[in-house]
Amino acid sequence: MELSGNDSFTPQSSSTQLSIEQEFIISKTLLTHESDMIRVDCKILFQAMENVMSYASNSNNTVEVHTLDSIESFATKETLEHAIYKLSRAILCECHNTTDMHAQTIVLLEMLGNYRWDAKVVLILTAFAISYGEFRLILEVYSHNALAASLAVLKNLCWRNSEALRPQFKAMEMLIKEMVELAKCVVRFEGLPLQLVLHDDHACTLMAGAKSKIYLATYWIFRSTLTSASQITDLIAMNQENSNTTVNAAWGLSSLALRLSRLCSSLRMQVDAYQEQIEPKLYEKLTVLLEDHTKVDNQELLHLFFSLNDDLPLKDSSSQEKVGISTLKHKVVMLLVSKPDLLPIEQTLLLLHQTHEHPDNKNIEHDYEIMWVPISSSETWTLDEHISFDYLSNSLPWLSIRQPWLLNSAIVKMIRHEWKFEERPLLVVLDPLGSVSNYNAIDMVLIWGPKAFPFSDSREKELWEEENWNLKLMLGGTDHFLTKMVEGGENICICGSGNLEWINEFDSRIKKLKNARLQLQVIYVGSRNSVENESMRTTLADINKDSLFTPIKVQFFWLRLEKIKDSILRAGQIQTFANYETMLERVSELLDTDDDNTNWAVFGCGNSSDFVMLKGNKIAEFFDRVPDWAKKVATLGFVGAIRSVDDEVNGAVACDHTTEVPYDEGMVQGTVVCEKCKRVMRRSIVYKCDGSK
């Protein structure tokens, strides 16, 4: 049956009249469709198929390899590989019967009756790409590859004058290009959240017209696949080149390509029109929901974000199970937004350390979820991004978007524009009602871990109001065992330097003090710029072996200091807290000292905010004057003794702080330390009149 070539449509018009032939095709095509039960991860499969078609036409392309293992199909017991193999065999069988190409097309359509329309077109083109790619590969390399040459002989592909076939090849390439472009429109249409624009009868009528084009497009892609396969079969069967046959074949392929081109142009306009309507509607609806504080839960918002086209849009890495958004109901949801390669390795490990592995996490682990939302740097995911996502999403103990490459463009736009995502990762916190309570909680999580729950802006300010600058703040989160030592009140020294020789000398002199029964735990942290140096890593690992402070924990220390500074600045921008200036000064001093390549050491005791920081030559004085400060430890404490000797050498900063101690008969006068400057206070007697009693 010969069909009309009038396949041009006006995409905005619902009154476009279909020809009798078109109505016939649509009715027959719909009869082959049983349900939309089986879905396929079309985006990855389409890209793999498109690569084959492209490489077959241009052997100079850069090769990207995809495996079918990462491509999902749903609601079917048949493997994707088996379905494609059966289709490929069916195409070869049916293409021999060219007397009724329509009937053979219907046979192929019936094989995919339970598949969605986008899956149908991608699968048929994938099946054809296998035989077409093999055909073109043999032609490309048989002249200089023994295996290909042997196959060419068996397949009768060793033509004496392949130039005569160039018009036919060009026409076939043109047809294949139009098939791929038309299939792309079908895939785009099927991926649209059309429920956002179907609000009235007029919209539904327009949709019916668009659906008609989808059915026609599917039919003509299937039929063109058969026609192309038939042409390849004819070429293989040729005993000699026939110019008339070649010209007629090229003309037939070109005519079919023109038909598909017209249909593609019409359908593309329709899809673009819907896309232009949907994106602002979805963007607007998300914006309204995020600002709506009357929501009863987070389900509608999360549905719009992640579940428009998939009832199970999430993946649990621990069980590899598909997860629905209902599992997030009434929970704090933390959206970890990053590139597909996640965070720098030390940030990833510290985040794990402060959440999943933190001993206090078990108290709140049922109240929140971390969900990874990877965003590609471009519109099309690269092979490296797919590999990175597959590995990390199967390894990290968080939920992740199962198919992040299918996120609607409006979602990606909102994340980039409203949440300011660029290159640096974000940890956006949604409260149990689905409102944003923190646009980036990554700093506070890396600093405080579970203590930061529910990870809101207000909680960050509360934490800084409660915080003091001490060893626990500097070291907490890097090592849970070390945190316990700090809480236990032990004397601890943190030593920093990028000079290996100086570190070894410091360690040697500290060991002599320990041999003299000084109770002191020393942590060597090197410097930010030297921790990647192999010699430095080896030295730090060796001298920190008693404290189990590994090189990765050294990286945690420096990362933690940077995050502390970032968090202080961020919290201070919202509302300055009580210790803002002091905290910022302390952390900046450490980081600036490191930037200046200055050797330094911090001495402290337990959770006390009393500590001494010595730099450069003062550290040498600390060792040279051991006899002077050692005899004062019993009365002033370890830190106080060091400070007193430092004051004797370098002079004390003036302080006029006073403390009143009520007098009792017979009281023994002891040593009193100034609460402000931490130095020993001079005793003075003050008489105060109590006549007001």
Image (cartoon, grey):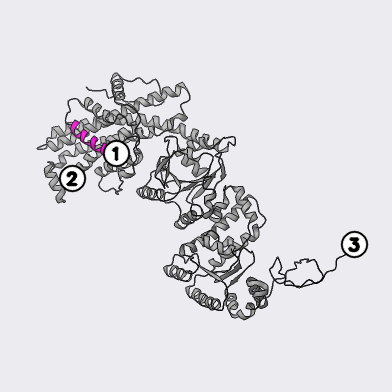
Q: Name the residue nearer the viewer: 504 or 105.
A: 504
Answer left or right for 630 relative to 515. right
The numbered disc on residue 138 is: 2
Is residue 589 in view?
yes
The picture places residue 323, in percent across and down from the top left corner, at 43, 40
Asked if residue 58 lies left or right of residue 306, the reply is: left
Q: Quadrant of the N terminus?
A: top left
Looking at the image, which residue is at 13% across and 41% down? 155
Q: Disc number at residue 80?
A: 1
Any magenta on residue 93?
yes
**Residue 641 vertical position relative to residue 269 in the rendered view, above or below:** below
Q: Residues within 10 Å of mark 2 (few under 14, many from 20)?
A: many
Q: Give the residue number, with chain letter if any, for mark 3.
A: 691
Considering the numbered disc 1 on the image, is that residue within a helix, a strand or a loop? helix
Upstream in sequence: badge 3 or badge 2: 2
Q: Can you tell which quarter of the image residue 8 is in?
A: top left
In the image, which is nearer the foreground, mark 3 or mark 1?
Answer: 3
Q: Which residues are magenta?
A: 79-95
Q: Give the tally of numbered discs.
A: 3
